[in-house]
Each structure stands twice: as C-alpha cells, then as structure tokens.
Amino acid sequence: MAQRKSKKTNSNKTDCSRTGMTLIDLNRCFNEHLFYTQGRLPLSATLNDHYMAAAYTVRDRLLHRWVCTVRDFIREGVKVVGYLSAEFLLGPHLGNNMINLDIFDEVREASENVGRNLDAMLDHEEEPGLGNGGLGRLAACYLDSLATLEIPAIGYGIRYEFGIFDQEIRDGWQVEKTDKWLRLGNPWEIPRPEVTYEVKFGGHTAGYCDDGGCYRSRWTPDRVVRGIAYDTPILGYKVNTCNMLRLWKAEAVESFDFASFNVGNYYGAVHEKVYSENISKVLYPNDEQIQGKQLRLEQQYFFVSCSLQDMIRLHLAIGKSLEYFHEEFAIQLNDTHPSVAVAELMRLLVDEHHMDWDTAWHVTRNVFGYTNHTLLPEALERWPLRLFANLLPRHLEIIFEINRRFLDEVRVIYPDDEARIARLSLIDEQGERYVRMANLACVGSRAINGVAKLHTELLKTTVLKDFYELWPEKFSNKTNGVTPRRWMVLSNPGLTRLIRSRIGGGWIKKLDRLKRLESYAGDDAFRREWQAVKTGNKQALAALILERTGISVNPDSMFDIQVKRIHEYKRQHLNVLHVVTLYNRLRRNPGLDMLPRTVIFGGKAAPSYYMAKLIIKLINSVADVVNHDPAVRNRLKVVFFPDFNVKSAQKIYPAADLSEQISTAGKEASGTGNMKFSMNGALTIGTLDGANVEIREEVGADNFFLFGLTAEEVARIKSEGYDPRSIYLSNPDLREAIDLIGSGFFSRGDPDLFKPLVDSLLYQDEYMLLADYQSYVDCQDRVSEAYRDRDRWTRMAILNVARMGKFSSDRAIREYCREIWRVSPNTVEMEDFGDLVR
Ligand code: CBF
C-alpha cells in the first residue's frame, strides 16, 4: 500500500491516528475502525463496512474540532445562535465533511488503498431527509455558513425516525414509501442519553398564591414525554469551528407500565411508550400547507420545549442569571413552526424560574427573531383554539395574557379601529376560534424578516401589513442564499477544478470573488473547457436517468430542468403545456428543424395533494407518448426523475443548461434551487418572482430569460376579474395543447383522467397559467435560438456563475449576524488530544 505523507496539516502537529490529517494517519484510522468498530478484516468487509469505517475516520476529526469549539463556548462565554427549525434537510454528510476538512483527496486515496471506490461509498450513504424542501434545505445551508463564519450556533430540531417519504413512480403515479434512513445506523450522530428533558401535555391549570403572595398558575399535565438529545457535528469549511445540530427523539418517561403488566395487560404495558414515541416518528410531508393535526402541534411544542430548556440549562451552567438570557442567546424561529416558543419561554421563565412577567416579557421579546417563508394563505399556521386548549392549557392562558396586554397597546395607538385590532389579535375570532401563530411570532420577536426583496415587500403590504404599520423598525429583508461548498465544490468537482485553475479557490469562502471569472467569458479556450465540463456532467446525469427510468437521453440535446416540490403555483403544468406545444409543432411539421431538448422534471407531491399527484401522472403520460413517437426522432424527450432529493440534486443541478423558475409572480417566497442552477452555469427562464428578481438584477437582463406577468399585474388582473376561458378561445396553439390533453390522447383514450386539471385551468386558473402561456412559449423560442449559438450561450453561462456572489448563504448569514442576532465570530484554536484531556 502506498504511504504518501500529505503536505496538509491543518490540525496541529499531532500524529495521533484519531486526529491526524496525513494520509498515513487516515489509512491507519480507517483500518482501525474497520477492525475495532465494524469487527471486520479487509477481505470480508462489505461496502457498508467500508463506508462506516470512512465515516468514523472523518467523524473523529470532527469531534476533535467539536471538543475545542465547546471548550470555547464554556471558556469564552460567547453569544450563541439557537436556530429552531422543524426541518433540517441536510443531505449526505461524508463528502461534505471531507470537503470542509480539506481531506477529500486523502480519503479517496485511503479508500482506494483498501480496494474501494470512494464514489461507491459516497453513493451508499443514506441521506437524512428531515425536511420537505426549501425551508429545511435553507436551514442546512445556514448551519454550514454559521460554522464556516465561526459563529457559535446550535441547530435545534426533531430526529424524525422516518423523514420525507421515498418516491416511486408506478404506472406514472407517485407512490410513497417509508424513508428508513436509520436502517443501517447513523455514524454521524452521538446520542446523549443523559441530556433529556420532560415535556408536558394536556391536563389542566389551577391558580395559587406563592410564598410572596403572588398569583400564579400551576399546570397539572395528564401526559409527560421525554426528549433525548442526538447531536450531529457541523463543521465549517477549513476552520476549526464545529457547531452542533441537536435533534430530539421522543420517549416515554416510563417505558414499561408495570401496573398494566401485573394485571395481565401485556399490550397496554407498552402503550405509553408507543404513544410517546409517535411524536418524533415521522416528518409531516406537507410543504406550504398545514392541517389541524394534533400530532403536528405536539411535535412543534415537543422540540421547542426541549430546546428552550436546553438553552436555559446551558445559560445557567455558565453562571449567568436568566435576566440576561437574551444577551447570551439569539433564537431564530424558522417560520411559524417553532413559534409556540414565545409562550413556552414565558412559561419557563415565569412558572418554572419564578421571574416576574415584565422581566420575562423583556427577555422573550429580545431573544427571538422570526423568518417568514411564505405568503400562501393556506400555509399560515393557525390552531383551533379547542385543540390548543386541550394540549397546552397553560400556554393558552399565557397567550391570552400576551394578547390582552398587546391589544391594550394597540388600542392606544389606533383608538376605535376595531377591524385592525381584530386583524392584529393573536386569536382569530371569526367563526371557529383559532390561535394565529404568525401573529404570536410577530408580537414575541425583535425582528421579522422575509427571504427575498419582493417577498419582504409583499409581506409588508399584504399578510403582515398591520404589523409593519405598527412596528416598521422590526422588519427587514434577508434574501436567501445557498452554500457553495455543497452546491459547487462537492456537486460539481469539474467546474470547481476549472475555476480554481484560473482564479484560485478563495471564492469558496468569498463567493463575490467569482466576479474575476468575467474576464474569461471572452476566452475561447476557457469556454471550450467550460463546455467540456458541462458535457461531462450531462453524460453522468444521462447515465443516472437511464439507470433510474430506463429512458435514454442525448447529452448533446439541451437539458431543460425543473426540479422542486410539485405544486400548482410552481406551475410544472405550464412547462408541460410548452412540451405539448413543441410536440404539436413536430406533428404538424415532421421535418421541422427543432433544437433537440430533453425536458427533465423531478419533485415530490404531498401525498394528500391530489392535483399535484395528477400533474406527476400527466408528465409521465406525456413522456410516454412523446418518447415513443417515432416521428419525434429524438428531438424531444421528457423525463420524470423519481425521488428527487439532496443526493440526486447534486447530480442534477450541474448538468442543467436551462433552469425553469416559472412560478406565478408573487407566490414563491424566494426559491433556492434557482440559485443552485445558476451557480452551476444554467441559464434561467423565469418570472419576476421571489429571488429570481435579484438573480436577474445580478446576472444582467441579457443573461436571463424573462417572461410573464409581474406580481402587481397578477393582483390587478385578478381584482378586475380574470377569465382564462377567453384566453383559451383566442389562442389556437394553447387550445390545441389543452384539447390534446383533454381528449385522452395522453391517457390511452381516457378523456376523464386529466379532466380535473383541464377544468381547473379553463374555469379557475388560480395560478394564471393561461395568462402567461404565450409569453412563456415565445421566451422558450428565444431560449432555443440562443442555445444554437453555443459560444454565446457559454458566455452567458460563465457570466451567470461569475455574478452569483450575492447568493452565498455566507452573505445571508453575515446579514443575520449583523442586523438581527448581533453575534460575532470566535476563532477556535486547536489543541492536541493529549493537552485537551490532561
Ligand atoms: O425560504 C426557504 C424556502 O421556503 C419555502 O420552501 C417554504 O417552505 N415556505 C418557500 O416556498 C421557498 O420559496 C423558500 O425559498
């Protein structure tokens, strides 16, 4: 076995095999884990054994940095960010951690030394799909940036036993399969059975006078669940800061009920355990839509309570008084999902730590920040008051008291404006009563932000208008960003190598430096290398598509890709209308000189969202006909890539020529896929929605394919009375496309299958596909024209990448740190293992 001594020693001088960074250390560590952790000799080791040994080898290095980071937390008393999120869509760890440790090449060599291909090991890793889409993935990017920027932070969430379902496609329909991500174990997490908290549910409250004569409320729950911490280290890129993601698993306080057992009720004896464990059993698969499900509120309260109790314990452990809690922690509410934290912190401070109400409210109001991620009315969480009262009776009392005091303040500012007061109230009193979680988050937070400029403006003028008028100073915009470590360096090694060859690697941490690529856009040789990288990525995706779907696609065709959750507002069916329009052109004129396109879709539909599932069926049905029609002669291919997740995304974004960002203007809060595509050299066809607006501003109007109505126009046309049918009647191409779908042509002669979709377009068209159809098709024609000129296209692609600096999550996190959290970096110094344990 070749033993090369690596030049890299970004740890200290240590030669310990558990922490050393040389190839020799890594080799030894890998073999030791194979032997001592997996109990295998190299000749009998499986792929899983090798993966585990590699993961533990890498994890040892993380733990070394983690221990040093925690030492600083305690020693330096630094202010910490607590990021509360019901979702963290992390993606596989191994490759990312190797990049952040800067040992990718060494681990590749170490694995080759034992006869294993690193890519097979990377592929073997089961990803933790603990999120639905954008919001959860954003949380993961933010953890990466927080660590990279050396900001002390803890992510808090739920350790779902089953994450987002695995998607299979059967006969064109989505079928959901349980995601058993923990099946083979999880080498990245460290269970902390001694870090546990009790969380109460149900029961009733009763008033009493404490020793000092103060009136207080005592909550007697009827159920108690225990939360157990599972920690995952989150290392920054080429720094020693290693933060943690602490996820809570629910367990019964008493796992076996001996009273039941003793009277012969064997099944009843474990009922409590099963019931309690349900809380962290499964992630709700709904992006954008909430339902009044009790278990979901239980999940939210469960993780929020454990997390706040944990932060309070950490705070008290460093000897500080709780009056200063907000000076030591900044807590971010990632959407309204954790917003019950406002009431829970008040309860913990007032009831458990006997703080007076005013001081507790001062602390609470100064510790929280709230990020809104959606304008869709159906996604604004509200809980039926009865459900809330049954589950969290004490919290409801606290919310009533917060509301009473808040509305008194409002009445002083807006006397006699009862309508406004009703809108601002934490309780919706029209018809059945609800607790409004966004209102609670606004009242209980110091800062409120949207996730793109347009989204923040729309928040201020629509859903949160009353709060903006009341407290304009609380509002700011924080446009989303994504981490270039996962989304460029790890996903697109070819492009990374090429960029490094010209401008070095500084851009990986300071993405603005990509600007230096601009001067290469006019360089022939560079453009050719760029095209070769793209072709390589397309070939790799073509192979994966063949493996997953059996469809063979031509890497020389334009890869036109739309991957994201399936939702009517995201308008995958507008894309289908374009495909059918192209198909009709070919049917009408078989000899047409058409630019060959491969239109690729991917994404999951919420299992209960019928229309979204029908859109998936439509895509597959159109694909089936178009791909098998000999008259098409490979000029058009349609693919639905099944089970879109982080791992496949890493292969898909780098292979795209065209990125479809075609939501109805005003509906997509930001989008982050749009950023990942652009960073990997795809050009965007998009509406002026979410962060598309800013992407276009940055890359320049000439390098972006714009179409469609603006958010203002959408609102105006709707208010004037929108009639989709008249558009259908007056546009022959549109009519032909819709009629073909409605005729049963793509559904084996069954005209009923897609009728619900066709009817919803013709008679409602909530998301205004018909209004944008012609502008979209014309724009697609401009895209095809531009693609024919490969040099021009490549120049535009290079400029897109060069101008993506703004969309690094590092920039976003810097803004949060400066303007909301008021936290500063802390450089972690490494100490050798021997010194640390001494
Ligand atoms: O802000 C992150 C993302 O969040 C969503 O996915 C969400 O869950 N509300 C939005 O739909 C995206 O626009 C946004 O980028």
Image (spheres, helix red, strand yellow):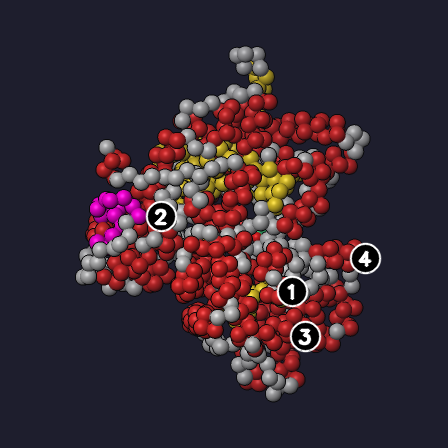
Callout 3 touching callout 2 (CB < 8 Å)? no
* Distance (Cα) linking label 4 and label 3: 27 Å
Query: The residue tagged with tag 4: helix, strand or loop?
Result: helix
**Mark 4 CB within 8 Å of ligand 1:** no
Image-quadrant location for residue 461? top right
- Label 2 vs 4, first from the N-terminus: 2
* Distance (Cα) linking label 4 and label 1: 25 Å
Residue at 31% from the left image edge and 61% from the top image edge: 118
Query: The residue tagged with tag 2: helix, strand or loop?
Result: loop
Instruction: Quickly name the residue at label 1.
Output: 706
Instruction: Quickly name the residue at label 4.
Output: 720
Query: The residue tagged with tag 3: helix, strand or loop?
Result: helix
Instruction: Quickly name the residue at label 3.
Output: 737
- Amino acid type at circle 1 is Leu
Boundaries of the magenta span: 10-24
* Distance (Cα) linking label 3 and label 1: 22 Å
Front: mark 4 or 3? 4
Front: mark 3 or 1? 1
Please identify the residue farthest to the bottom as the structure is shown: 591
